Amino acid sequence: MTATEETAIPGPAAEPQSALQVQHLDVTYRVRGQDRLALRDVSFRVGRNESYGLVGESGSGKSTVALALTRYLPRNGRVSSGSIRIAGRDPLALTAAELRELRARSVSMVYQEPGKALNPSIRVGRQVAEVYEIAGLGRAESLERSEAMLRKVQISDAGQVMQRYPHQLSGGMAQRVVIAMALAAEPELLILDEPTTALDATVEAEVLELIDGLRQQLDTSLLFISHNLAVIAKMCDRVGVLYAGELIEEGPAREVFEQPRHPYTMGLLRCVPRQGQRKDHGRLDAIPGFLPAPGEEISGCIFAPRCPIAEQRCREAAPPAFDTGPGRTSRCYLHEATAELPRNTPVDVQLSAPPTDAEPVITVRNLAKTFTSRGEKVPALTGVSLDLERGETLGIVGESGSGKTTLARLLLGLIPPDAGSAIELDGQPLSADLKGRSQSQLKALQIVFQNPDSALNRRHTVRQLISRPLATLAGLSGSALTERLTDLVRSVRMEPRHLPLRPRQLSGGLKQRVAIARAFGGGPRIVVCDEPTSALDVSVQAAILNLLADLQAKEQATYVFISHDLGLVRYLSDRIAVLYLGRVLELGPAERVFSGPHHPYTEALLSAVPSLDGKRTERIRLTGEIPSPANPPSGCVFHTRCPRRLPTGICESTEPPLAEVEPGHLMSCHIPIDQLATLQSTDRMS
Amino acid sequence: MPTGVVAGDAERQQTPLWRLLLRRPTFVVGAAILLFWIVCATFGTAIAPHDPLAQQLLATNQAPSSAHLFGTDQLGRDVLSRVIVGSQSIFIIAPLATAVGTVLGTTLGLILGYLGGVVDLLASRVVEAVLALPAIMIMFLFVVALGVSTTTQILIIGFIFTPLIARTVRSAVQVESQLDYVPGARLVGDRSLRIMFVEILPNVLPTVVVEFTVRLGYAIFAVASLAFLGFGPQLSTPNWGTDINANYVLLGAGYWWESLFPALAIASVIIAINLVADAIEQVFAG
């Protein structure tokens, strides 16, 4: 009948080795006098020294699980049924003192924002030492142990870091400190809630590796919560997929991701561009519809309304957890048919012809921008030269602080460049100031911002938001405007009934569609997409990327696609520019840049990306932090972190020019390309 | 099937603002008190039990009784009637003065907050300089220079509020200017004036409304203080501040009702406004 019989888990006494056991957990939130079910009958077990991943989109209940486990649910939330055992103890039955004890010794948590987890007015050393003092050690010994712990999380100058305040640490360093604090009490269970989501890919890779290493060393069990499938695949032995508060599939991570047995898991995996997939290979598959609202009464399978293979019985009765293999369960009647799940999106979509125009649309020469911060000159972008052709997509990648967003803002004319910079549109120089640009120049360049909540005026309706560029840039009015408005709304797959709504009444994906419609309203020739999907869920992200690709094919627009997600950049871009400390280190056709030989920095960025197949590739380690742009290193700016630095000393003394190493492929590196090719292919073999 | 079919259930409904306000007891109490005084100010003599100007020289300084609930003053006038009718001048001057200050202050705040730069730097210093002077002194100087008509009172209090309101609005505008919809508007060719008043203003309106209600309380106090200091209407016209001034010397003689009731009236209005302002602020803060 229900999951209970088939996945019946023996009581805690019978399984003394589990660090965490959750049985039939229901959590409800009381909202406006009504109880809404946020978790439905969730059962799972984390074995001793096991790493268990919980994956799901926003609203799936991932964080509610973490909060319920440690009894940190908000005031209106409560565990309405089920049981929890952490190291054999039931946190729900503990007194306040016992609960403090449990939180202090048995379970630790690490959250997404390390900056918020540390007290800004207490030095790092004191904060870490407190954990030991609570455990009963003396002050001096606590400090000593803290320093040792900070070394364990690979902070090399631990003594110095202990003297600093949290705001003086970089994001990656702060997260290491938080992890050190979490592990100081040697907890049996470490709960990590999106611990690397706020970090750069290279830092994320380091932190993940650190967590993995410490787990082996300290004999701690992990509950790893993330929306990122690849991170879970890399970090976890077993995985549970949450959907609308229900654990719909569970099993060994590798198996679940290779052969999902639930249509939702399958759908999620198809939303992500897989290794090497590109837009001309076919569209990403998107999951239609939305997550049910919390507490919504659903008679049958919770995923049935969005499921492409749902049958009558799926809508009538909720499926039990079927046993689909050793240690695997799936709440789907049709778990055997999942492998042949039909796509929601047709694969072969007509694509634009590759750009053929010889004349570039936009030419950037020697673009530079220096900000002044407290009297100090900080170069954000230095001597960037680029050409953009009609209908092509230039992907821009780089860590935070590399100058990606500055480049975008300079192109758009939102900030003036330094003297000596030149931007030309169709051979005509573009004024640095927006006010000096003609109507047609203004029309030509538009942007899709990262966060639609910030980019859309929350007091305006969808109609006002989309009409504005039609009136100002396209010069439309009256019925012509209304007609174009309707067209535009349909082309971003929205409906006229959305027009009177305000942004807060729309979901994240819909908001981003409004932003895209606004960008395309004036008939732009170049659209800058600044991390357009990073604020969105995976299933929504796929639909937005498909939309961008469709619009590009239709309008022959040129894209400048900025993203920290290399998979997305590879999927969408024709050419790629790799930025580091405001300089282009590599520029070339997407395939060449990704397949290599590539710049050592590109190599490092690529090897930092966890892949979905869960294989642990030997990473090219990036040592140290990104240097301050105010004092860039001498010679090649990357030499301080370069794993392939030449012993001759030339990297330290001379900046390599950005030279063409093969047709259309530019690189700024002293190592000759054939030598790079040899180095990189031998590393990949071993 | 198109990608990402849009379903209706993602659209959320909003509770209207007034319903949120009515759920707050502070708002209900404050609004009820204000409503009472507005009725008094509007109907004045019609609801007053006696003629507030009628002198009864045989019944001066009568303690509160069933005939005169609030007693009579030194000229034998009914204190209750004077308190009821006395609300009129305050309820005309204070809201208008606050409105003048809010309109000017909001405009100035928008300009300084959005344009920034040298203009902002200079103007903000001037604003701070004005704020450093005691408001009552400035009021005094202007009243002496310009005389005490209703119009001058409205303008003087309005001008004094302008820098105060401008400063608050300016910082709200600065926060808004950091959001991407502002460069977004520039990119579709919108001019600064439109960005300030059509894009940013609706988003700082909650701040403006809160500022208006808070300032209204101060304005009531300012009007009453001016009257108390002798810069109010003619002595015979009922006015809370003037009446306190005329009668407080008699406190020592035990005639407390003559100044206490007008003072309580002032206090009740200011408390009511603060209750309403608090509720509005909390509703806006979510």
Image (spheres, rainbow, N blue to C red):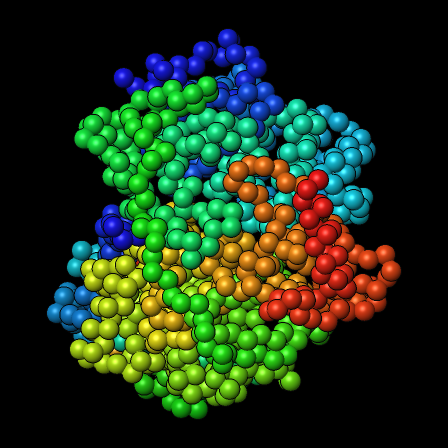
Above/below status of A230 relative to A406: above
Say whether residue B39 is visible: yes
From this view, report whether residue A230 is shown above or below residue A387. above
Q: Position of residue A152 (x, y in %)?
A: 74, 36
Residue A16 picture quarter = top right
Say which quarter of the image contains residue A489: bottom left
Can residue B182 be seen by looking at this rendering?
no
**Closer to the camera, B261 or A242?**
A242
**Residue at 31%, 22% in the rendered image:** A320
| Direction top: furthest residue | A14
When the figure is inspected, residue B175 is found, relative to residue A101, above or below; the finding is: below
Q: Which residue is more in the foreground, A456 or A283? A: A283
Q: Which of the 4 image quadrants contains residue A136?
A: top right
Tell whether B23 sits left or right of A581. left
Query: In the depicted view, which residue is nearer to us: A660 or A301?
Result: A660
Q: Quadrant of the C terminus of chain A?
A: top right
The residue positioned 30% from the left and 41% from the top of the image is A342
Residue A510 is situated, as x and y percent measured from the top left of the image, at 32, 56
In the picture, which quadrant includes the N terminus of chain A? top left
- Position in image of residue A295 (x %, y %): 29, 36
**Which of A316 and A187 lies nearest the eye of the viewer?**
A316
